[in-house]
Image: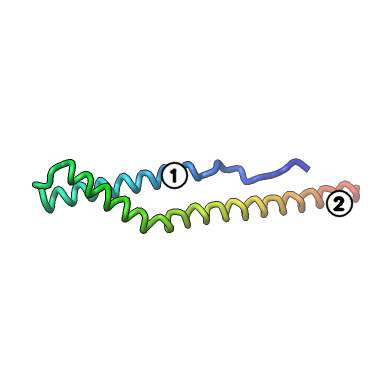
Amino acid sequence: MKPVTFDYAYSCPKIDRAIAGAKSEIESFLIDFIEELSPFVPKKERDRIASDYAANLYSNLEDAFEEVRSTNEDMRREAESQIESLARRIAELEHDLGAAS
């Protein structure tokens, strides 16, 4: 029997892009926030503060992002298991039909 797998592209690269986008959005938000609250903070200092706080915030949220990745991997394994089980059942039924004719 030919191996049967879940026919859907691996989504880790897509998750990685979403994480990078979230990091960028967090930092951009913080830059705007600092600029609005204190427009006299020099750009270099504002960017450094935003970058530091964004990294800290992401560090606190990272487990949530990685849980998404882990859940995605679990779903892929389960889908492949179910597909394999159904493929075996189909092969059994095809065998039974062949034996009956």
Exactly how many numbered labels are in the figure? 2
Mark 1, Cα crowd under 10 Å, few <14 / some 14-19 / many 20+, is some
The percent position of residue 60, horizontal first and vertical second, equals: 36, 58
Q: Which amino acid, by three-letter code, is at mark 1?
A: Asp
Which mark is on residue 16?
Answer: 1
Left or right: residue 70 versus residue 39 is right
Instruction: State the mark number for residue 50.
Output: none
Residue 97's x, y, as percent?
85, 49
Indicate the position of residue 19 as horizontal and vertical percent values. 39, 47
For image coordinates 73% across by 49% down, the residue present is 87
Residue 91 shown left or right of residue 58 in the figure = right
**How is this picture coloured?**
rainbow
For badge 2, the amino acid type reads Asp
* Crowd rating for badge 2 (residues with CA inside 10 Å; few <14, some 14–19, many 20+): few
Element at label 1: helix
Q: Foreground: 14 or 53?
A: 53
Residue lying at 78% horizontally and 43% vertically, measured from the top left: 1
| Labels 1 & 2 near each other (Cβ < 8 A) | no
Tell me where residue 45 appears, x and y as whole percent: 18, 45
Nearer to us: label 1 or label 2: 1
The residue positioned 91% from the left and 47% from the top of the image is 101
- Residue in the foreground of this view, choosing between 94 and 9: 9
Report whether 31 appears left or right of 79: left
Q: Quadrant of residue 9?
A: top right
Residue tagged 2: 96
Q: Secondary structure at mark 2?
A: helix
Labels 1 and 2: the sequence-earlier one: 1
Disc 1/disc 2 C-alpha distance (Å): 46 Å
